[in-house]
Image: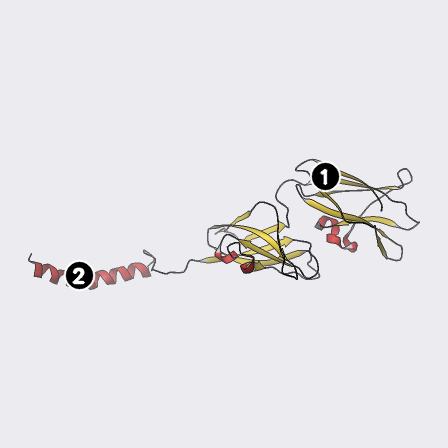
Amino acid sequence: MTTASARAAAATWRPVLLVAALLACLLGIVPPAGAATAEATVTVAVTAPTQFGDTVLISGNTAQLGNWNPAAAVPLHTTAQAYPVWSGYFQIIEGSTAEYKFLIRSSSGAVTWESVPNRSVTHSTTAPTAVDDRWNVGGGAPVAATFHATAVTAYGQNLYLAGNLAELGAWNPAKAVPLTTDGSRYPVWTAGLPLPPNTPVEYKYLIKNTDGSVVWESGANRGTVTPATGTFTADDTWR
């Protein structure tokens, strides 16, 4: 075949090849250049006690989560009825895995990241994908915690325990943990409950009067860190 004939044949086949390539793209055989990657929604719930004016956000290693930039993190929301649970959603590439963490932004703009290792979520193509976490709490079996408090009370008064975890009422006296006592143990009061492992705990005792009023003990918040496994015991005296 002469050079001229080859050029003529190529010119004849070029439109046919272009049509075939276009059909392949339309049929999904070859993804067209610049095609959008499919995204899915991940619902989020996190139990996070906060101060008035704080906002809880989620950030991570994907563009949808702001690439670890607090300014681009996804804000979560709560209500008086739902608190201390904050909820929301973010987008994820279908079938992919994302790393993430929660952060709290104060009313002044200060940012506090949780200190647990990065969390991860993998999108499922067969079921709804959701995360349900607790602020600064990783995985692991609960720790059996026991609190003993020596507190002299008046008739009708009862001792309670409140703190920064949901199990401790998230500082809400109405959700505080009641301690019990009896004639053989008084003035020592006791409460037992499961707490998350490896978790910083802040707490205080309070007394509820018969009229519903509340008296908090004085001094700074008490603090401890629960162990990785097993049991935990606190022996305190009312201040």
Name the residue at the right extreme.
155
Between 167 and 115, which is closer to the camera in this rendering? 115
Q: Residues within 10 Å of mark 2 (few under 14, many from 20)?
A: few
Is 67 displayed left or right of 44 in the figure?
left
Q: Nearer the viewer, mark 2 or mark 1?
A: 1
Q: Which mark is residue 41?
A: none
Q: Quadrant of residue 26?
A: bottom left
Residue picked out by circle 1? 144
Q: Quadrant of residue 24?
A: bottom left
Q: Quadrant of residue 183?
A: top right
Q: Does residue 105 sit above or below 230 in this rendering?
A: below
Q: Residues within 10 Å of mark 1 (few under 14, many from 20)?
A: some
Q: Quadrant of the N terminus?
A: bottom left
Q: What residue appears at the point 15 percent right and 63 percent down from the top-left corner?
A: 11
| Residue 176 spot, x, y in % from top left | 78, 51
Is 154 displayed left or right of 52 in the figure?
right
Amino acid beneath label 2: Trp
Amino acid beneath label 1: Ala
Name the residue at the left extreme.
2
Q: CA distance from mark 2 to mark 1?
A: 77 Å
| Residue 180 spot, x, y in % from top left | 84, 44
Is 69 displayed left or right of 195 in the figure?
left
Residue picked out by circle 2? 13
Name the residue at the top extreme.
230
Is 9 displayed left or right of 203 in the figure?
left
Between 184 and 111, which is closer to the camera in this rendering? 111
| Residue 93 spot, x, y in % from top left | 46, 55
| Residue 34 spot, x, y in % from top left | 36, 61
